[in-house]
Amino acid sequence: MKLVSFAIPCYNSAEYMEKAILSILKGGEDVEIIIVNDGSKDATLEIAKRYEAEYPTIVKAVDKENGGHGDAVNTGLKHATGLYYKVVDSDDWVDESALMKILEVLREMVEKQQLVDMLVSNYVYEKVGAKHKKVIHYQNVMPQNRVITWKDMGHFRLGQYILMHSVMYRTELLRMCNLQLPKHTFYVDNIYVYYPLPHVKTFYYLNVNFYRYFIGRDGQSVNEQNMIKRIDQQLFVTKTMIDMYEMNKIANKKLRGYMTNYLAIMMTVSSIIAIRSKNPENLEKKKELWKYLYEKDAKVYRKIRYGILGQTMNLPGKPGRKVSSLAYTVANRIFGFN
């Protein structure tokens, strides 16, 4: 039995994917590594097949036509046999000692027959040129080393939200809620984290710096210029998340509050990209996005629009947009998100 299925979506990843593979191989027979070649034009598939031949009980090489990152995640999930499912991007990697601790915890859960729906751990910004590596942890939010529920959840700080880097879902939960990420779309990692949340009843926080999130490659989707070029995809993902749930039907107050705040972050990111593009057409798209939220759920709109983030992103006129842009620059220096 595999404890964790690690999916590594790869598109032209030959130059750097082996670091991710080797870091996970340290988990031995407790792990499954599903390397999904998403229609690469370089040696990605050859590398995947080489590792599959060398580690046939651990590595699966899956070849598919290009469908984008989300489709590769979907494909990995279809092939997963592990109790838990974890996505590791091909230019990232995991920490060996943290991996061993996570596997130890999962073994104990299996022995006690007490599987949680979601396991959360820390991630580290491996930012090119940064002297100090920023660690995103949840010590102030979640009790450690025990099974918890939403009622045990504390207050998330800005920049501390659960991302794909920090989450590991129970595989059958993802299948049960019929998670399907859209094809040929960037930023779907937000859907991956957000959509299953109402189905999560129990989780576990392990305070280890597990995921190493590499920042600094020119082609990365979080590069600001790439985000501006792909603003329509960012807007599509945000609207998709707005449409997913009616917040007033989510009974758990802490879950509802967390999901509303997550939407606030998405609205902020979409807005600031439009502002920093300095493109009148994109500024109109920003207005349309806020109107879209209002028409979907006026109560959620008011909560987000008149909160700190919403007000900062909607200051009037050119001077207001300059203030919004400055706020983003300051936040980026603090949080280092791209």
Image (tube, rainbow, N blue to C red):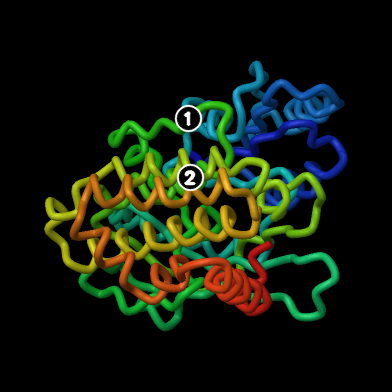
- SS at mark 2? helix
| In the rendered image, the vertical position of residue 165 relative to residue 240, given as above or below | below
Q: Quadrant of the C terminus?
A: bottom right
Residue 242 appears in the rendering:
yes
Q: Position of residue 215 (x, y in %)?
A: 74, 59
Dot 2, crowdedness within 10 Å: few (<14), some or many (≥20)? some
Does residue 136 appear to the left or right of 116 in the view shown? right
Q: Which residue in the protein does label 1 denote?
A: 182
* Three-letter amino acid code at the position of disc 1: Pro
Dot 1 or dot 2: first in sequence order is 1
Residue drawn at point x = 62 percent, y = 41 percent: 230
Q: Nearer the viewer, residue 176 or 192?
A: 192
C-alpha gap between disc 1 and disc 2: 21 Å
Numbered mark located on residue 285 in the image? 2
- The vertical placement of 278 against 80, above or below, is below
Label 1: state its secondary structure. Answer: loop
